[in-house]
Amino acid sequence: MKTLVVLTGAGISAESGLQTFRDADGLWEGYNVYDVATPEAWERDAALVQEFYNMRRKAVLAAEPNAAHFNLAKLEKYFDVHIITQNIDNLHERAGSKNVMHLHGEITKSRSSIDESLIYDIESWELKMGEKCALGSQLRPHIVWFGEAVPMIGSAAELVAKADVFVVIGTSLAVYPAAGLVSYAPVQSEKYLIDPKLSEVYGISNLKVIQEKATTGTDMLLQKLTLG
């Protein structure tokens, strides 16, 4: 069975009503990202950061996977599918995808402020100040903030390097280090880019562009990969 690796970004979740990226004006849901999504913001006003992510978590739990998420899950009948996502929601998992790697963390989980290996599921939408890890430190969202290292990037690169088919969906390929993953795809592998705004990416061999939104584009991809 061939290995299919998919890199997904905000575009796939946007069709479920979620905006999970930094907008061009530097605001995220009306907040300056540096006030709510950096280690410095946490040090300065942890309660504000918690409130922001509680609202994002509430929105994620209210959202539903869309056709693009379900289409990727359907591909598991035909390929060994691995999804690498820049998104912090759990829509891939809820659509049925079994192998999902979250580069930027998971909003439905919390972790220790002093030991990042201590990770916990959040039972509802709210993570409260005063909730502590086993070591006694305040729990924070299990999110990779701006300015923090992306611990899974090495594993993601190794995975892309094994791809027989590599697909990029709903990401501008402008945010590093995730954008650099494209360069690890084998030269001979089939490559697909699904995005309504991007018409081409220079310097990538065997690349086919599907200039559509994620739902429509993955419909086309499913037919292409399974029917030829």
Image (cartoon, helix red, strand yellow):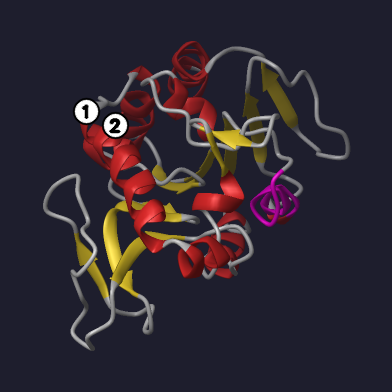
| x, y percent for residue 129 | 24, 64
C-alpha separation, residue under disc 2 versus residue under disc 1: 5 Å
| x, y percent for residue 20 | 48, 36
Q: Is residue 186 rendered to the left or right of residue 98?
A: right
Q: Which residues are drawn in magenta?
A: 175-183
Please rate how many residues cluster around mark 1, counting C-alpha atoms within 10 Å: few if below 14, some from 14 to 19, many from 20.
few
Q: Is residue 88 magenta?
A: no
* Residue furthest to the left: 123
Q: Residue at x 76, y 34 (%)?
A: 206
| x, y percent for residue 166 | 59, 41
> Is any part of residue 92 visible from this angle?
no
Name the kind of residue labelled 1 in the image: Ala
Q: Is residue 74 above or below residue 98?
A: above
Q: Is residue 26 rendered to the left or right of residue 139?
A: right
Q: Is residue 108 above or below residue 130?
A: above
Q: Which residue is mark 1?
A: 62
Please rate how many residues cluster around mark 2, counting C-alpha atoms within 10 Å: few if below 14, some from 14 to 19, many from 20.
some
What secondary structure prevails in the magenta region? helix
The quadrant holding residue 110 is bottom left
Q: Residue at x 11, y 53 (%)?
A: 123
Query: Of the numbered discs in the image, which one, if any, rests on residue 59?
Result: 2
Q: Are marks 2 and 1 in contact (CB under 8 Å)?
A: yes
The quadrant holding residue 168 is top right
| x, y percent for residue 138 | 28, 74
Secondary structure at numbered mark 1: helix
